[in-house]
Amino acid sequence: MSKRAGLAAALRAVRANKGLAQSDLGGAADRKFIYRIEQGKSDMTVGKLDEIAAAVGMNAITLMVLGAVSSSDQTAVEVLQAVQAELDAFEAAGGFDALARQVEDGAIVSREHERQKRSEAVQACKSSGMTQREAAQHLNIAKSTVADLWNS
């Protein structure tokens, strides 16, 4: 079963479990859209998933886990264990530090800000006498990026 169909089945099951009609989710989406989602005929954005999950009184992640359970042969515990293993690997690779660098004052850091920092680092390498190849290795960025920033 596809992920879309799994999420459709999960939403139907949650609605049935809570005794909600499609029209009860009207604050999140109109009945026709809920119908198309529950038929597996429409995808939804993360924002819409969040709104629909809130309308049924759940966290969007819980609804996604239920969809994963429905579309696979795994139990909820197995799905959550797999998620935990992925989070552990992400953390071990320094992912949470990288994630923290992407957010500043509750907003996503502008790519322009990152480009400026990278440009300054390339210029510092250039000033210290490194070649473009050495700068790329030192900064762990592509040689083509270093070349683009070298004379800027």
Image (cartoon, rainbow, N blue to C red):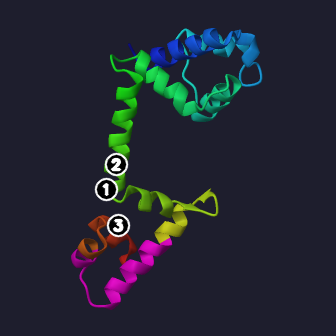
How far is mark 1 from mark 2, CA to CA?
Answer: 6 Å
Quadrant of residue 13 within the rendered picture: top right
**Amino acid at circle 3:** Thr
82 in magenta: no
Q: Can residue 152 be seen in the rendering of this structure?
A: no
Is 64 displayed left or right of 90 in the figure?
Answer: right
Res 145 label:
3
Q: Position of residue 1 (x, y in %)?
A: 38, 13
Classify residue 31 as left or right of residue 59. right
Residue 104: give x, y in percent of width and height: 59, 64
- Which amino acid lies under the numbered mark 2 shown in the image of this protein? Asp
Relative depth, front residue between 117 and 145: 117
**Residue 16 location, x and y as percent?**
62, 8
Mark 1 surroundings within 10 Å by alpha-carbon count, few (fewer than 14), some (14 through 19), many (20 or more): few
Which residue: 51% across, 60% down?
Answer: 102
Q: Which residue does the numbered mark 2 point to in the structure image?
A: 88
Looking at the rendered structure, the secondary structure element under dot 3 is helix
Is residue 120 covered in magenta?
yes
Q: Main secondary structure of the magenta part?
A: helix
Counting labels gives 3
> What secondary structure is found at the residue carrying circle 2?
helix
Query: In this picture, is 120 found above or below 60?
Result: below
Residue range in magenta is 116-135
Nearer to us: label 3 or label 2: 2
- Residue position marked by numbered label 1 in the rendering: 92
Compared with 104, 85 (above or below) is: above
Residues at badges 1 and 2 in contact (C-beta under 8 Å)? yes
Instruction: Please determine whether, in this image, residue 100 is positioned above or below residue 22.
Output: below
Which residue is found at the position 41% from the left and 20% from the top? 69
